[in-house]
Amino acid sequence: MAIPRHDASNTTAWVVERPGPIGSFPLRRVERSIGAPGPWEILIKVAACGVCRTDLHLTEGDLPPRTPRCTPGHEIVGRVLQAGCDVAEFGPGDRVGAAWLASTCGACRYCRAGRENLCPSSRYTGWDIHGGYADHTTVDARFAYPLPEGPADEELAPLLCAGIIGYRALQRADLPPGGRLGIYGFGASAHLTAQLALSRGATVHVLTRAEAARRLALELGAASARGAYDSPPEPLDAAILFAPVGDLVPVALAALDRGGTLAVAGIHLTDIPGLNYAQHLFQERTLRSVTANTREDGRAYLAEAARHQPAVHVQRYAMNRADTALADLAADRITGVAVLLTE
């Protein structure tokens, strides 16, 4: 597809003016300068950007801002307008995705060991660098993903964080083949991860507070869907906590069978109450965190998603309604995932 050269010096973008409760209108839509891409960068005309709970944490101040007046958004689908002189993989017109991990040092012991998600110098899209709540954005091409031409923009965008992080969380949960998985909270990432686990032959039990989310879970093939603090109908081999609610950690641990693992998938979690060793950890139960993702996670998930083709349940918003989308997310008015569209 032919894409004209972008010569403008500005783009329309949302910025976090002053972090605070979403009702205090911390987001502002502005004209922001955007220059030509650097040697390893690509300039993207944004078509869609998923709305992630991490964006809400940044906007409300749960995540301390790293860049003043940063533009949120890290589930970006668009077309390359310009590529830097050292970029070989992408050219103008290519469909491309940008995700949460924006860059790493490539030299530390974590990067050398294939654990770049733990790089102390890692930087993140929509936190350290400007993200996709904008008409245009610039990213490091080495951390971008080529995207297929078929699926709609709004179906691809959530895969770039909700899907990838869910993939890593499922790997960290050590679910055995044909195992019993509990999913606590059922938003954007959870509804994709449930489908991934089901495609691998797992039995999935969903535990979440929203009735609409429980209905969606059953529609997607979950064996049961109950309240967040309820017990699943059988012991779990593994569980993933997507809800940012520390009170659910002991609840999920108590639901595990012997040798089970709980993976906590969020970047932000409220305080965890005291654990009882015999009830929550004894018999080799394991509690794990999930930190970002590697590029290999991204490539592996996108390839697997292309095979099992998850049903992405989308609520669409125009890009000029990003503040409304985040307010709806904060109020649990979104079932599935919200996506911002520029056209």
Image (tube, rainbow, N blue to C red):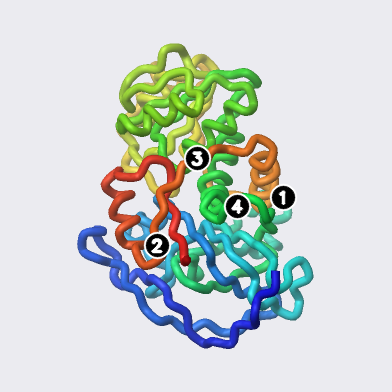
Residue to which mark 2 is pinned: 318
Identify which residue, 214 or 113, lies in the foreground.
214
Q: Residue at x 21, y 63 (%)?
A: 24
Which quarter of the figure has residue 40? bottom right
In the drawing, does residue 309 fall left or right of residue 33? right
Q: Is the C-beta separation of discs 1 and 3 under 8 Å? A: no
Residue type marked 4: Asn
Picture coordinates of residue 343, whole percent (x, y): 47, 66
Q: Residue at x 69, y 58 (%)?
A: 146
Q: Is the C-beta separation of discs 1 and 2 under 8 Å? A: no
Q: Is the C-beta separation of discs 4 and 3 under 8 Å? A: no
Identify which residue, 212 or 142, lies in the foreground.
212
Which quarter of the figure has residue 168? top right
Picture coordinates of residue 23, whole percent (x, y): 21, 59
Q: Secondary structure at mark 4?
A: helix
CA gap, disc 4 to disc 2? 32 Å
Label whose residue precedes the other's in the sequence (1 or 3): 1
Residue to which mark 4 is pinned: 117
CA gap, disc 1 to disc 2? 41 Å
In the drawing, does residue 157 fall left or right of residue 79? left
Residue type marked 2: Ala
Label whose residue precedes the other's in the sequence (4 or 2): 4
Residue type marked 3: Ser
Q: Residue at x 43, y 38 (%)?
A: 242
Circle 2 crowding by C-alpha within 10 Å: few under 14, some 14–19, many from 20 = some
Label whose residue precedes the other's in the sequence (1 or 2): 1
Label whose residue precedes the other's in the sequence (2 or 3): 3
Q: Residue at x 47, y 37 (%)?
A: 190
Of badges 1 and 2, the one in the foreground is 2
Q: Is the C-beta separation of discs 4 and 1 under 8 Å? A: no
In the picture, the disc for residue 113 is: 1
